Image (cartoon, rainbow, N blue to C red):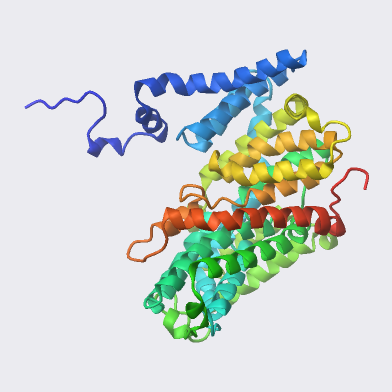
Amino acid sequence: MTVSYTTSPPENTSANLSELRLAVAQTGNAGRILLPLGGLAIAAVFGWFATLSGAGPGGDATVTLLVFAAAVWFWTFTKVDDTYVALGAATLLVLAGVISTEGLFATLGDETIWLLLAAFVIAAGLTSSGLTRRAAAFVVAGADTPRQLVHLVTASMVVTTFAMPSTSGRAALAVPVFTALAAVLKDRPRLVRALALLIPSVILLSAVGSLLGAGAHLVTSQVVAAATGTGFDFVTWMLLGLPLALACSHVCAEIVLWMFTDRAERRTPVRLTVADMDNDPAQPVTGPLSVYEVRAALLLAAVVTLWCTEPLHGVHPAIVALIGALVATSPRYGSTTLNSGFKTVPWSMLLFLAATLALGTALTTTGAAGWVAGALLGPFRGGTSPGLFVVVIVVVSALAHLLIQSRSARSAVLIPVVVAVAPLAGVNPAAAAFASTAAAGFCHTLPSSAKPVGMFARLEGVPTYTPADLRRLSTLLAPATIVLVLAFTWFVWPLLGLPLQLGK
């Protein structure tokens, strides 16, 4: 008997297809034509603006814009893997002679790549030691009321920003804590749903507290450094971002509590003990600290302290992280091995970051970003209110997740243009880039908007929330986040050394 098919392979073989082939197959025959044509159509828009402005970019800048436009199209409207698109765009720039082969491969050796790589290995050591679960259990066990519980959970999630350099990694770390809470509070479904919404929301909003909180932060720092000569170091980013992370996270906690619990629920006491959270025999949260937990705590404290005191000792944060990774995986001291630590590293994300660093540098150095800035945002030139410019970029950055799901991809698209156009409005490029990146931390509208949101929306055996709950939360959380970012941009960050206007 012969079995034939015409449109799609059998289910048992489709799992072996690459993501690229799957994405194209899902669009059908028309998709095979429309996907590349869509990228070219967006590229043609730049030519149209060149005609309107009377002068287009020349040489390398034109090629860079064409490649960039095609990449934006694939990031926005297709399911092709973000890393595949970024690597393809960077390769095209090399073949076109815009950047050198050495320039592309050098991004893999960039200090930010090494910093992130080592930080993931350190985080693997912390997780394997059991310290993070014990700390979370002791924090939430101190709550007597639902309001105390949500704010203690919020505070603990903010702290994890410095322990795990990945929002999806932090979400995975929080899942067993949440499932334990859900089991203890199973007779209070409203509170369980509120916690399910709160944890991923705070993870995303609090990432701005650390330079390592998201790959997008490293993209921003590199683009700003390429354009102005100075990026953001660990201490500067923490000084600017941590207050905003705390403000956004705790405002989010109040919004979630108000929207998803009633007055009677909020007035009912909470009875939690550390023993209630002790559901994993491999990593107990009761009893004395193990040797590995003590060592992990000392290591984390030492690494963060050295990062924060770089001006005093002069050791680069990447070297500090590398030393920490070696200690965390050392045969006699560490709680994991180097090979195990490497298995937790999101290599796809690191390659994406390296490729977008090359793309962002090309946009800046060839003058492509500057030309786009002048063609698309010319109204901001000369006399336009810096405040209006900041409002526009913050709102656009907060809503961009509806089109571009990857946080790093959003920064790769937005930051080069923001940095180039900011001086036209009299705005400090570093301040504009930081505000844009901070606003991009809001990505809560859909389960597909961010990995932590999607992860908590589908926990087997635990009731969480629906897409309608996310949309309802976003109606208040989006404007609250935008207002907080604008308030910090105008009033707080200038006091901390990041002025909004040029020359101030």
Position above or below: 186 against 474: below
Q: Residue at x 67, y 61 (%)?
A: 245
| Residue 225 visible in rendering | yes
Quarter of the image with the N terminus is: top left
Q: Quadrant of residue 159?
A: bottom right
Residue in the foreground of this view, choosing between 488 and 242: 488
Q: In the picture provided, is 354 more to the left or to the right than 392?
A: left
Q: Residue 242: image x %, image y %?
A: 71, 62
Position above or below: 500 against 190: above
Q: Residue 369: image x %, image y %?
A: 73, 29
The count of marks equals 0
| Residue 112 visible in rendering | no
Residue positioned most to the right: 503
Q: Residue 219: image x %, image y %?
A: 67, 43
Q: Residue at x 60, y 41 (%)?
A: 400
Q: In the picture provided, is 15 more to the left or to the right than 467?
A: left
Q: Residue at x 83, y 42 (%)?
A: 386
